[in-house]
Amino acid sequence: MSQNNCQLSMGDIVSVCKRRGFIFQSSDIYGGLQGLYDYGPLGVELKNNLKAAWWKSMVHERDDIEGLDSSIITHRLALKHSGHEDTFSDPMVDCRDCKCRMRADHLLVDGKCDRCGSKNLTESRQFNLMFRANFGPLEDGADFVYLRPETAQGIFMNFKNVLDATSRRLPFGIAQIGKAFRNEVTPRNFIFRMREFEQMEMEFFVEPGSDEIWHDKWVEERRKWWEKQGLSSNRLHLFRQSPEELAHYAKATVDILYEFPHGQEELEGIANRTDFDLGSHSKNQEDLLLRSKVCPNADSTAKLCIQREPRDGGGCLVPYVIEPSAGLDRGILAILSEGFSREVLENGNERLVLKLKPHLAPFKVAVAPLAKNNEAIVNLAKSIVKNLSSSGLGRIKYEDTGNIGKAYRRHDEIGTPFCITVDFDTIDNHSVTLRDRDTMQQQRINIDELAAFLRNKLLS
Ligand code: ATP
């Protein structure tokens, strides 16, 4: 057993991620592009496993959330009416008193808010965050579109489509996982702040009035979910934003912070977005009795609301929205920095081990033949791989590089929960050695019992 262990620094995480094939700098043979990363053979497995865990808990294990996969390329008007475009290319300041956002060069001469005259303004900030692209064959810039800066707007624009197709009643949610793009001024800290990243977002539509209760429930749900992914509760912190910090659409926001190697920062934000988004994307807003302040919309063709039953008073209701919005890449960084540890063993040797939860591990089991040129042993090892692969456990790796010691070290480092060794005794007594990544304990187990044993360990 290990005597003590310590976590890795950010630099060590970056280097092991490259060495073992989790994450590479994007376009690195041309000098790289800042804020862009590629997920390698193991990284893509880990990322897919984390997405699957989120989807399972949000969509499959509940009966009140539908899924969506909307386009990345987004209509210019959508991001105009969402409020993103106003803040596209100029330094902006916010008035803390009337909440108005204005261009810094639009302030009254003496630095006062041009709406209410207050001097209580935030520092000027650069909001040049959205990526523009030409749409169609002409490059005259007239028909430009945006790469979405968040997945949420695709959900709001499909609110009515999903509602009509599923006949949902409140409360219900729409979940989406996908890429988002922000031209961050200073991308940094590896995959923490990127220019192309992935979000896991869910918009949960509720009756106004029940929004605060639902907000609290989602904060709790989400915190618990991150713990199930292996993050320890003492490294997760809740932070309620002050009124000055709130985004223009939010009534309240609670951030889930994690103690990343570079410091404590946001992993996920859970916002109460009120009726701002559905209201902003609707026509005839005056019919909707909106509670939030929205800009007029002469472009939308829809009223994004729910038709009330006559017995409930009839008319249109625009639900409030609670939005848990998590960064997938930040999740990967948190899981890697939590999971990697350097252990000093009793014999004085060191090992690097990645203690991933089994459902996240890229490989569930590695199977190694003790003698690589003994046909009987090799065939037996390959048949074990084949059987386990078809039993729904996840990815099983046939491992014949290096000696057994090296194979154990490699699979410790990439988080494989179990290694199986097929040796000469296996031919006689049909049993293999099974090694546990975390305890390093080994046991003999009959081949016929392997699948049931592993299913119990890996899937329960
Ligand atoms: P920050 O304050 O760190 O810039 P944010 O408050 O702007 O984040 P949101 O707009 O709330 O972030 O986005 C929701 C989630 O998306 C964040 O909690 C984060 O996990 C993720 N995210 C946002 N920007 C980035 C980025 N540049 N790179 C990686 N993940 C990001």
Image (spheres, helix red, strand yellow):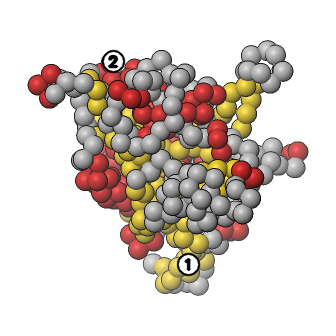
Q: Position of residue 289 (x, y in %)?
A: 33, 34
Q: Position of residue 217 (x, y in %)?
A: 28, 54
Q: Position of residue 415 (x, y in %)?
A: 52, 58
Q: Are marks 2 and 1 in contact (CB under 8 Å)?
A: no
Q: Which residue is mark 1?
A: 6
Amino acid type at mark 1? Cys
Q: Is residue 419 above or below residue 166?
A: below
Q: Could you tell me which residue is drawn at 51 percent across and 31 percent down?
A: 296
In the image, 182 versus 457, the foreground residue is: 182
Q: Is residue 135 above or below residue 214?
A: above
Q: Residue 76 lies in what quarter of the image?
A: top right
Q: Earlier in the sequence, mark 2 or mark 1?
A: 1
Q: Which residue is mark 2?
A: 165
In the image, 183 versus 110, the foreground residue is: 110
Q: Which mark is residue 158?
A: none
Q: Could you tell me which residue is drawn at 63 percent across and 71 percent down?
A: 262
Q: Secondary structure at mark 1?
A: strand
Q: Could you tell me which residue is drawn at 64 percent across and 38 percent down?
A: 85
Q: Could you tell me which residue is drawn at 47 percent across and 47 percent down?
A: 249
